[in-house]
Amino acid sequence: MEQKHPLPPFTLETAKQKIQLAEDAWNSQDPEKVSKAYTIDSEWRNRDTFVNGREEIVRFLQNKWEKELNYKLKKEYWAHTENRIAVRFEYEYQTKEGNWFRAYGNENWEFDENGLMAKRYTSINDLAIKDEDRKLK
């Protein structure tokens, strides 16, 4: 059976480990690698987009990183329960036209007993920034 450690129930330490693993995976910008942290039928809400299952996750991330260049993400612990984790995050990216943005948001995650994320609900706001105002390099 497929498992992704650490497994629930989460402690403060294991919740923070899970967050760091997610941050590292997303910063790899490897859609296949990222998708392996989610259940086969994982549910996402990302801004106004609804994504269901690993195949859609891979396509979503491929499209995302074709548009969001020089992507760099930082996640931060907010709260947790036995099988849920809440994070705040910010990431920076550049458009094909050379414009920079910083995105701020919150995510609510729910995991199955094997440590795979079954649900991911994300709210995000973008802020145009200048190159010299970048924080995440």
Image (spheres, grey):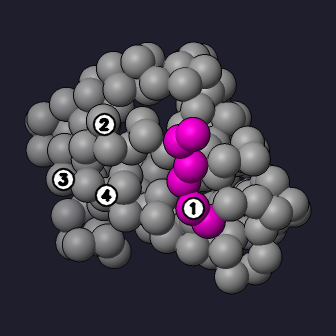
Which residue type does callout 4 highlight?
A: Asn
Q: Is residue 73 magenta?
A: no
User: Real-space Cα distance between discs 4 and 3?
Assistant: 10 Å
Residue mark closest to the camera, 3 vs 1? 1
Q: Tell me which numbered mark, 4 or 1, is placed earlier along the sequence.
A: 1
Image point 57% across, 74% down: which residue?
17
Comparing 131 with 39, the one in front is: 39
Q: Tell me which numbered mark, 3 or 2, is placed earlier along the sequence.
A: 2
Image point 37% across, 64% down: which residue?
24
Residue mark closest to the camera, 1 vs 2? 1
Badge 4, how many Cα within 10 Å: few under 14, some, many 20+? some
Q: Tell me which numbered mark, 3 or 1, is placed earlier along the sequence.
A: 1
User: Real-space Cα distance between discs 3 and 2?
Assistant: 15 Å
Comparing 64 with 3, the one in front is: 3
Q: Position of residue 29 (x, y in %)?
A: 26, 47
Q: Give the residue at mark 1.
A: 5
Which residue type does callout 2 highlight?
A: Pro
Q: Position of residue 25 (x, y in %)?
A: 36, 55
Q: Quadrant of residue 77?
A: bottom right
Tag 1 secondary structure: loop
Q: Give the residue at mark 3.
A: 70
Task: Classify 131 as above or below 115.
Answer: below
Task: Determine which of the numbered discs, if any, sits on residue 135 in the image.
Answer: none
Q: Is residue 128 left or right of residue 95?
A: right
User: Real-space Cα distance between discs 3 and 1?
Assistant: 29 Å
Magenta stretch: dominant SS? loop
The magenta segment is: 1-6
Q: Give the residue at mark 2.
A: 31
Q: Is residue 128 left or right of residue 15?
A: left
